[in-house]
Amino acid sequence: MKQQRKAALPRYGEYNCVLKYLVEQGFETQCILPPPLTRRTEEIGARNSPDLVCTPFKTLLGSMIEALEAGADVLIMVLGACRLNYFGELQEQILRDMGYSFDFVNLSLYNTGKKRDILRMLKVINPRRSLVKAGKALYDAIQMVQHLDDITSLYYQNCGFDPTGTYPKIYRKFVSDLYDARNLTEIREAYRNASHAFADVNLRKPEDPIRIGIIGDYYTVMDPFSNLEIEQKLADMGVEVHRLMNLSNDMLRNTNNRNKQAVIRRFSEYSMGANSTSDIWQAQYYAERHFDGVIQVKSACCMPETDIMPVLANLSREYKMPILYLTYDSQTSDVGLMTRLEAFYDMVEMRKKVTH
Amino acid sequence: MNTQEAFLGIDVGSISTKAVIIDRENRILAREYIWTEGNPIGAVQRLLGLLEKQWDPKEGQITGVGATGSARRLVGAVIGATVVKNEITAHAVGTTSFHPDVRTILEIGGQDSKIILVENGIAVDYAMNTLCAAGTGAFLSSQARRLGIEVEEIGAYALKSTYPTPIAARCTVFAESDLVHKIQMGHPREDIIAGVCRAVASNYINNVGKGKKISSPVVFQGGVSKNSGVVRAFEELLQCPVIVDENGHLMGAMGAAILARRSLERTVFDFSVKNMDFVTRERSCGGCSNNCEVICVYRNGSLIDFWGNRCERGAARTDRHQQ
């Protein structure tokens, strides 16, 4: 009998719980969680990557290597709208050259928009399982993504104003519940528990708190390790942190990029690839709601994010809303980041005091 | 209390260490500027020794201490600062106190450069160089060494030139090879030096100042502002006068002192810190594969502060942190 396969997806924020659910419940295949991202992940990723590729490539590759070390034999690579789409092929080649043997499921190969190709993709992961079951699990996983994103948004908007320190505990419990969930009831229960627990905490929040919106490239902005936990750092300073950029908002809810392009036409008429349209749209969304500032979080060598910087500068001038541009490379020290964040916070706070 | 309150501000940068003592009306009572020489604690202790000589205890009592600059955390712990602030805020606060109508602050230090836009006396936008130290003081001093002159002489040489040599400004490595090439082609030394100054200014405007609206009055500060060649290059590029305050290099320290005055915390400062024995030790936590480098600071053998750990596992035991 063929040995059971063990699938893994490189670490991507907390979204691995969703894939774990999908693989285990939908395809009845074992799912391996790569260890949490650490400096070692970045080091081995960077050592085996082309030098000028963006940091997410290196981090993803490092996490794949750690997944293989942990016993995975099927690797799943995500798809994306920028050169992330080509990453899978290159990463597979690098890993094969390093001598690993594994099956590689490159999702971008099946991302043709045709239903037939989506079905083919499902068959590759586990050929013997029923499509009905996979479809059901996919439905659950979609609910899970949305619950995860909703609780995460709530967490970062409020945890800076929690005097009791229970917010992080509730959030950690919620995430670990999602990793353990085996059916939709358990997913919903975890969500309910967390939102009730959040509601029970008495927040000490000023009427008009400092609000900062975060935008940035698909990977760096959503992965706390890669952005050196920028959201937590801001929240700890007493900021209401908003991040519209998450999988639910970008892939399930507000997906009409042509409409977004129409909204931001004043600043940019054409798409600049990847989530550039969406990013500008988000910055404008924050500006129109009188946010105190916006922070752009991007990886070094990310083309679309670099291209939108002049557009953001125009937007910043017109709305009189400061924008901080941060570029992340595989750096380990957060001293420079703290200097910039503190200065940004001080500036935004002084501005707010004067204008009110 | 019949004694006047005074406030000490210390700015410990990568290259130089600055300190001022001010009174309640922001008047400078004592000031000092020395090289850091890769030893921030030693520099601060030397600096305190020099300040103490200028300081007359009858003038008042130092009741607040502000620390800023890249070694602010370390120095703040050592001297027991009441306020530890980043250098961007400190510079903005310092400069706007002395030039209330300033609109743009250009700042070029030893390792970093920043631009701060000001409207009605408050900072509204800023940018800082990322990933690359091109066009900072370190570049100027290494090129001065190559040309065989002191970094302080650059300005005088540059002003002699009428036709500055164009030098690629995009990146220090390119600038340097361009410079070597121009030297070997026989360009006069003044023109090359003026070209280097211009490269620093245009690199700054294209890099840090990208997309920022630079409006007059412009104040230029940081160590490089003492270089008249760069000042002239900025005036030519921006087409407006550039103000260089005689205390421009002290603005970070001034800002730190002013922030200490504004904060409510008060402790009496004692110059005896300059004779104490401080040791820093790095230890690798090893609690997980992050291997956080935890820095521990000891005063006369006992631990007073630590940082660098990402979680509680790396926490060291100090009297201050036991709660």
Image (spheres, coloured by chain):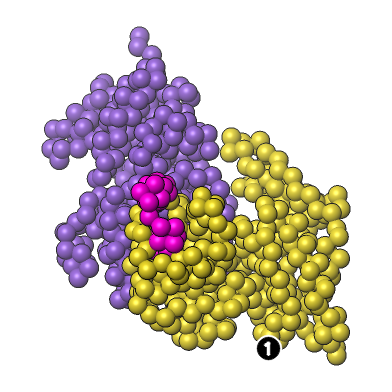
Foreground of the two, A119 or A53: A53
Q: Is B14 in the magenta?
A: no
Q: In the figure, the purple chain has which letter?
A: A
Residue at position x 36%, y 33% in the image: A50
The verdict on residue B197 being magenta is yes
Q: Which residues are magenta?
A: B173-199
Residue drawn where x is 83% and y is 73% of the image? B53
Residue B121 in percent (x, y) is at 49, 84
Q: Amino acid at mark 1?
A: Glu
Q: Which residue is mark 1?
A: B25
Q: Position of residue A290 (x, y in %)?
A: 37, 75
- Residue A70: x and y in percent read 48, 24
**Any idea which chain is the yellow one in this picture?**
B
- Quarter of the image where the N terminus of chain B is located: bottom right
Query: Which subunit holds the residue at mark 1?
Result: B
Neighbourhood count class around disc 1 (C-alpha, 10 Å): few under 14, some 14–19, many 20 upward: few
